[in-house]
Amino acid sequence: MNQVRRLLPDFGTTSSPTSVERLKERGFAEALRKVFAMSGEDIISQITESGIKGRGGAAFPTGLKWSSVYKAPGETKYVVMNADESELGTFKDRVLLEEDPLGALVGVLIAAHAVGAKKAFCYIRGEYRDVENRMAEALDTLRSQGWVGPDRVDVQIRRGAGAYIAGEETALFNSIEGKRPEPRVKPPFPTIKGLWASPTLIQNVETLANVAVLFAHDTEWFKQYGTKETIGTKLVAISGHVKQPGVYEVPFGMSLTDILNAPDLGGGIAGSGRLGAMLLGGAAGTFLTPEEIAKSSLDYASLGAVGANIGSGAVMVFDDTVDLVGVTTRLARFFAEESCGQCVPCRVGTQRVVELIENDGIQSRPQDLRELGLAMRDASICGLGQTAPLALLSLLDRPELRQHA
């Protein structure tokens, strides 16, 4: 078996995902009892020792982020779970919240206790209404057990309105505050000045679920999977030309070839049966050639060597018949539509990329496209503008993938 089931419950689990029984089966009830008897310093120390990194894309050390919020001056602090999963090809958080919503919510409670927050928000993508209902049921279970409430942590669910930009952490804060979801200029960073200008800890759903399973066990158990540099497991959302698309939990360090072809994972290449390319990390990700895929593993160092990143965990697979220039054109239109328009490099840059590709094609003006993409990457205020040109830039760097241009 190549797949691991830690964040996701075992296949044989029959209890309701939102039940008290599930809370106990998964060890989360005991984890909460243990954590609420610990000091913030001790909790953060264990998080740091575990080596957990953010699973939303940035891979920032979780212990360091928590420590920054804990030490930040201010009586009022907040915790936010970012479930605004809008990256194309990414659906891991949805599956995680469907199958085990208590895990991520227990992670929220642990985080709040650790940093000294009395209020937390779960910001969920507006289209995930069924998932939102399941989260509400899980919160009711935690409330019935005394873990959520005025004496512990007040947890509220806030629904997004479909804006891709709202997944950016500071735009998300503005949305919660009832403002237009536009990114804020950083610094100051959210750990110092986040929600309502107070220190705020914001984490991805998968990161918080990792925290829950860590405290349901211990650090040594947690370190059984992964690599020396990147500990633990990762949820990957595999789509496109694979025989078994879906969400799978795999150890860091697994080869990309095994993720695509293992019988209990991707199951092999569909379509023509011949691998053409992979877009790793979603719309804001990087195209990889079959040769790069063959020598790379799901690890930041390995992927960094070929100019890629794990990002959101999206693995979009294309057989050798797909027009990748056409795919890139559609991605460019998506970013032009989703740009909030606040900063010039992104507002103008995304539109200009679409114009250049549609009017002149990629082959005729590659240097102009490259310079424009680099300017967007380096000068945009937030991650949307900074990552919008990455797929295009990776295609420009790999002429063998542009056979249809």
Image (spheres, rainbow, N blue to C red):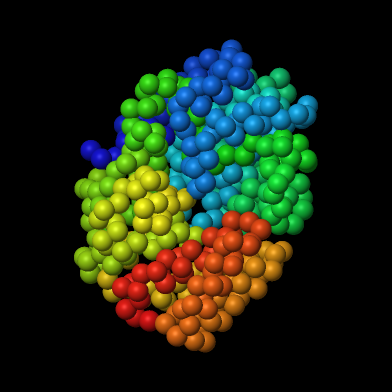
Residue 383 visible at all: yes
- Position of residue 121 relative to residue 242, above or below, is above
Q: Residue at x 78, y 40 (%)?
A: 197
Residue 247 visible at all: no
Look at the image and tell me in which quarter the C terminus lies. Answer: bottom left
Q: Quadrant of residue 40?
A: top right
Q: Quadrant of residue 391?
A: bottom left
- Position of residue 252 relative to residue 352, above or below, is above
Tell me: 109 left or right of 214.
right
Tell me where residue 389 appears, x and y as whole percent. 52, 66
Q: Residue at x 76, y 46 (%)?
A: 177
Tell me where residue 259 appears, x and y as whole percent. 28, 49
Q: Residue at x 54, y 72 (%)?
A: 371
Look at the image and tell me in which quarter the N terminus lies. Answer: top left
For the residue pair 60 and 272, the one nearer the viewer reads as 60
Tell me where residue 328 appears, x and y as whole percent. 45, 72
Q: Residue at x 27, y 62 (%)?
A: 290
Tell me: 73 left or right of 130.
right
Tell me where residue 74 appears, x and y as whole percent. 78, 29
